Image (cartoon, rainbow, N blue to C red):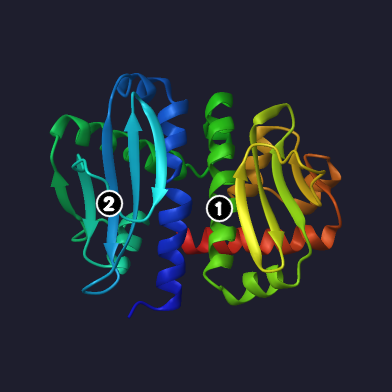
Amino acid sequence: MPSDETRYTNKVFMAGALPLLKTIAADVPELKKKFEGVDAIYQVSAKVNAEDKEAVHFIIENGEWTVKLGEYLGQKKIDAELAFSSMEKMNDFMKGKVANLLPALKIKNLGKFVKFIQVLLKMSDLLGIKDPDAVDDKTAVLLCKLYFYLLSSGISQLNKMGHPAIHEWALKSPDRCYQWEVLGHPECTAYMRVKAGKSRAGRGEYKRAKPFFNMKFDCPKSALMILLGTGDMFQMTANQQLIMDGGPEFGVQIGDFMMLVGELAS
């Protein structure tokens, strides 16, 4: 039986990281072009035990991606699947420990498989960036978007799994929304709504009410300094590069959960 840490890590990858493929395929022009007019079904899976497995699948219709958690149970055949023999092996593979950890490749259509791998490799390249100054402005915006989506989804999914620290916090929470954004880039926004133990992550601005707590950055590079751990939070707050719109104590809570997701995924 996989340990709790293994399960938490796998969920961060399944429900937080891999769904980013949809965003990358839509926002990177050369990849978007490759999927023009394409219909395909992809899946990534990992065995939990002899009978069960965790999975995420992607349905592409005329180039438009839909992401679904769980196994694909439709009538069409999967064009390509990365099938890991255990959650531990998938986790290590996603962390870059590739040697002897390659998944079984189930390929129905080689051309579509190659396209899928190209998106996976692009995600690996982007999430492997460590220096905010090493990217151009367009890439910085995309990276911020990816990390905001990953963090909001990762925290929410860990709560749903009953992670002790996060779920205890969520159980005590009234109806509140926490949001991440980069000023001047409304496309680079994500949120998480929490209420009495339940949570839901969303992409874009939360519009039903003003967020209870909003972590704002003055520009993409400032956001990446925090997300990649190269900036000093106190100094950046003093310089208005980081604006915590809400009580600082709530910023500390969210910051701790952001670090937790980051540690599981690294």
Q: Position of residue 151 (x, y in %)?
A: 58, 52
Q: Position of residue 122 (x, y in %)?
A: 37, 36
The residue that mark 1 highlights is: 153
- Residue 230 visible in the current orientation: no
Pick whichever, 37 or 88, lies toward us.
Answer: 37
Q: Could you tell me how many numbered marks the image carries?
A: 2
Q: Is residue 17 above or below residue 76?
A: below
Examine the rendered structure and indicate whether residue 49 appears above or below residue 250.
below
Instruction: Name which quarter of the figure residue 184 lies in.
Output: top right
Q: What amino acid type should be assigned to the residue bearing mark 2? A: Leu
Q: Residue furthest front?
A: 75
Q: Residue at x 63, y 72 (%)?
A: 167
Q: Which quadrant of the figure contains the N terminus?
A: bottom left
Q: Please state the horizontal and vertical placement of residue 47, each as a whole percent of the image.
A: 26, 66
Dot 1 falls on a residue whose secondary structure is helix
| Residue at the image point whose x is 30% and y is 71% from the top | 48
**Is the C-beta separation of discs 1 and 2 under 8 Å?**
no
Look at discs 1 and 2 and give the one toward the viewer: 2
Where residue 147 sits, quadrant-wise, is top right
* Amino acid carrying mark 1 in the image: Ser
| Residue under the point 27% across and 42% down | 42
- Rate crowding at label 1 as few (under 14), some (14 to 19) or many (20 or more) other CA atoms within 10 Å: many
* Mark 1 and mark 2: Cα distance apart in space: 24 Å
Which numbered dot is residue 73? 2
Rendering coords of residue 229 (x, y %): 61, 52
Closer to the chain start, of discs 1 and 2, is: 2
Q: Nearer the viewer, residue 19 or 28?
A: 19
